[in-house]
Image (tube, rainbow, N blue to C red):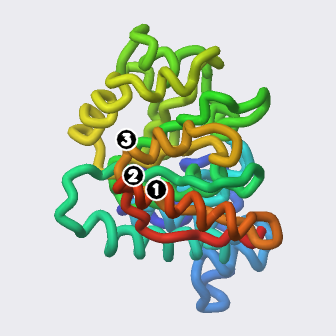
């Protein structure tokens, strides 16, 4: 889409407005001396979301229309980029950029970990990856939860095929060609978890995982890894050691403080950098 187009032209090209509706809005805009978007909203021909979508294209800010949803509604950074929750995601992005990406560390890989289940790791990882991609950073989101139950995982959020993914790569059955670009978010790519393996810990502990991350760092600016809960298995700690850096996630009135503290101690003992923590109060 040409960023030099007017809001009306963008909305027409997107199929949201026709010629007659555009003319009506232009007439009201001139009569009331207001902006095109405000005139269209006043006439109930367009919504604020339509205006935001057009503005995002004018300013080269990738953002998807809720009218044509292809992905899960949990991807609010893609569909509701101006909501308070996404503003918080951008604040986290800023802090990570200052404390992580602006360091001398060559490895741009970070894992999102927590000791407990159901704290929102996949939700935060996905939306954090989206806001990095919206900033123009080449971003890879890796789903390293090789134990996810049916109906859960990044492949569900992004409506992707799970057949080939991380487990296949670690088993020696493929490479980074399994990474999938996300339609509508050109800077974002996703590597799904792949088929459910019988030996996730052994796969994650293989040298192939380290090679995969090293290869990916040469292709991407930011690599975010979604992990399983650390309370039952050591998968998350293995992933954290490979990544070298983590953000810890806890959920208000859900997460166990002693378990979180113990996980942080174990990560420190393994020389994993903890760049910060996120309290999910949803």
What secondary structure is found at the residue carrying circle 1? helix
For the residues marked 3 and 1, what is the alpha-carbon distance in whole angstroms?
11 Å
Q: Nearer the observer, disc 2 or disc 3?
A: 2
* Residue 228 % position (x, y): 63, 41
Q: In which quarter of the image is the C terminus?
A: bottom right
Tag 1 near tag 2, CB within 8 Å: yes
Distance between mark 1 and mark 2 Cα atoms:
5 Å
Residue 6 as seen in the image, left or right of residue 97: right
Residue behind mark 2? 270
Mark 2 lies on a secondary structure that is: loop
The residue drawn where x is 64% and y is 15% is 198
Instruction: Measure how far apart labels 2 and 3 are at the Cα level.
Output: 10 Å
Quarter of image, res 157: top right
Q: Which of 65 and 161 is in front in this view?
A: 161
Q: Where residue 44 appears, x then y in whole percent? A: 80, 70
Residue appearing at x 39%, y 60% in the figure: 60
| Relative image position of residue 112 (x, y in whole percent) | 53, 53
Q: Mark 3 points at which residue?
A: 242
Residue at x 53% of width, y 16% of height: 164
The answer to which quarter of the image holds residue 133 is: bottom left
Q: Kindly identify which numbered label has been placed on residue 267.
A: 1
- Tell me whether circle 3 and circle 1 mark residues in contact (CB < 8 Å): no
Q: Bin the neighbour count of mark 3 within 10 Å (Cα to Cα): few under 14, some 14-19, many 20 and up.
A: many
């Amino acid at each position: 889409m040409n960023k030099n187009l007017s809001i009306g032209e963008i909305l027409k090209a997107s199929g949201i407005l026709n010629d007659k509706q555009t003319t009506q809005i232009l007439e009201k805009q001139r009569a009331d001396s207001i902006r095109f978007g405000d005139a269209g909203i006043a006439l109930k021909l367009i919504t604020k979301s339509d205006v935001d979508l057009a503005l995002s294209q004018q300013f080269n800010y990738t953002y998807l229309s809720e009218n044509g949803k292809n992905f899960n509604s949990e991807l609010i950074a893609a569909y509701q980029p101006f909501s308070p929750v996404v503003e918080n995601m951008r604040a986290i992005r800023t802090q990570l950029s200052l404390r992580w990406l602006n360091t001398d560390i060559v490895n741009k890989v970070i894992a999102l970990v927590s000791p407990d289940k159901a704290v929102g790791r996949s939700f935060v990882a996905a939306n954090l990856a989206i806001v990095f991609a919206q900033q123009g950073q080449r971003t890879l989101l890796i789903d390293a939860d090789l134990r996810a139950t049916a109906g859960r995982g990044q492949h569900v959020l992004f409506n992707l095929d799970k057949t080939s993914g991380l487990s296949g790569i670690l088993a020696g059955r493929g490479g980074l060609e399994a990474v999938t670009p996300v339609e509508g978010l050109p800077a974002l790519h996703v590597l799904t978890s792949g088929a459910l393996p019988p030996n996730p810990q052994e796969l994650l502990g293989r040298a192939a995982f380290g090679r995969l991350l090293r290869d990916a760092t040469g292709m991407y600016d930011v690599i975010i890894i979604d992990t399983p809960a650390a309370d039952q298995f050591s998968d998350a700690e293995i992933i954290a050691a490979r990544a070298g850096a983590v953000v810890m996630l806890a959920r208000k009135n859900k997460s166990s403080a002693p378990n979180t503290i113990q996980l942080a101690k174990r990560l420190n003992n393994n020389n994993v950098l903890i760049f910060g923590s996120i309290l999910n109060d949803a």
